[in-house]
Image (spheres, rainbow, N blue to C red):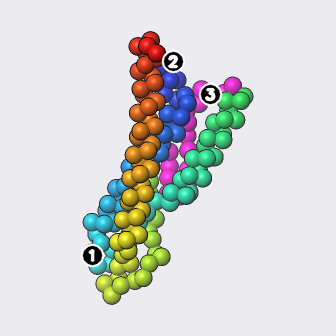
Amino acid sequence: MIKGLFQAGSMPVLERLVQFTGARHQVLSHNIANLSTPHFRPRDLDPRGFQVQLGKAIQERRGRAARGLMREPFRLPDTRQIRDGGRGLEVRPAALDENILFHDRNNRDLERTMQDLAENTMAHSASMTFLKSEFDALRTAIRGRV
C-alpha cells in the first residue's frame, strides 16, 4: 500500500525527470572540465528523445489506468541512450560531432554547452520543486491536516 503511494500521480514521472537531468548535468560538467583536452569529443544525452519516451510511458500508463492495471511500476521504454533499470536510469551519452573541429582535434563549443547546462539546471530545479510539492501533499495527508 505504501509503495503504491509513490507510484501514484506524477511522482514516478518527476522522479525519472530528476534522474535524467542529474545524469545530463554530469555529462555536461564533464564536457566543460575537458574543454581544452586535445582529441576530446563532447558527449550529451538527447533531451528531446527523453521527452518523447517519457510521453510514451505516460500514455501507456494512462491506458493501463483505464483498464484498471496500475499495479505495474512506471517504466520508460529503453533507447540507445537511456535504459530504465528499475532503480534508476542507466545512460550512455552519445558523442557530439556537430561543431567545428579545431587544430587539437577537439570540437568544443563553450557557449552551447553553457546554454545546455543552464537549460538542464532549470528543468532539474523545476522538477525538484514539483516533486517536493508531491511529498508535501503526502506529508499533509499523513498528518491529517488541511
Eye-nearest disc, 3 or 1: 1
Direction top: furthest residue: 144
Identify the residue shown where x is 45% and y is 71%. 96
Q: Callout 1: 10 Å neighbours few (<14), some, many (20+)?
A: few
Overall secondary structure of the magenta section? loop
Query: Which residue has dot 3 on it?
Result: 70
Q: Which x, y percent locates residue 122?
A: 41, 51
Instruction: Give the mark nearest the N terminus, 3 or 1.
Output: 1
Image mark for residue 36? 1
Q: Earlier in the sequence, mark 2 or mark 1?
A: 2
At horizontal 55% and vertical 28% (from top left) the residue drawn is 8
**Picture mark count:** 3
Residue 88 visible in the shown view: no
Residue 21, horizontal then vertical, whole percent: 42, 50
Q: Of 134 and 86, which appears nearest the observer? A: 134
Whole-angstrom CA distance, mark 2 to mark 1, is 52 Å
- Where in the figure is residue 13, as x and y percent of width and height? 52, 39
Q: CA distance from mark 3 to mark 1?
A: 49 Å
Amino acid at the residue labelled 2: Met
User: What's the amino acid at mark 1?
Assistant: Ser
Frontmost residue, 133 versus 73: 133
Left or right of 32, for residue 144: right
Q: Residue at x 28, y 69 (%)?
A: 34
**Residue 109 lies in what quarter of the image?**
bottom left
The local crowd at label 3, few if under 14, some if 14 to 19, many if 20 or more residues have their Cα within 10 Å, is some
The circle drawn on residue 1 is 2
Question: Which element is circle 3 on?
Answer: loop
Amino acid on which disc 3 is placed: Met
The answer to which of 13 and 68 lies nearer the viewer is 13
Where does the magenta region start and end? Answer: 68-87
